[in-house]
Image: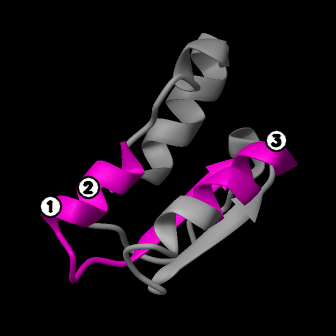
Amino acid sequence: LSFKLLQKFPNSFLDGVDYEKRMIAKSRDRILKLTQKFRLFNQNMKDFKFSKKYDIVVSVLAVHHLTDIEKEKNFLMIR
């Protein structure tokens, strides 16, 4: 999904979060084909700190792993 968003919005900047190092490496290889305007974080999304304002936040195949309390906590950080 990130790759498709970067294709559609080529002037955007991407921050990606994934717990699996293998997925971070795979994502880095694909994203570098389109842009160098990205950062990838190898960590659990439950621990990710939103340190800046985002125009959009997208989750793929991850939110369903959170408890209801964790979902609420993460969604409250998105404003």
Residue at image location 51% in from the left, 28% down from the top = 72
Q: Are marks 1 and 2 in contact (CB under 8 Å)?
A: yes
Locate residue 24: give its quadrant. bottom right
Q: Which residue is mark 3?
A: 20
Give the residue type that dot 1 points to. Lys
Residues drawn in magenta: 1-28
What numbered label is drawn on residue 5?
A: 2
Q: Which residue is mark 1?
A: 8
Give the residue type that dot 3 points to. Glu
Instruction: Give whichever of 41, 49 is nearer the camera.
Output: 41
Q: Position of residue 54 (x, y in %)?
A: 35, 68
Residue at image location 40% in from the left, 81% down from the top = 35
Check residue 21 for magenta coloring: yes
Q: Are marks 3 and 1 in contact (CB under 8 Å)?
A: no
* As drawn, 32 above or below 63: below
Sequence-first disc among 3 and 1: 1
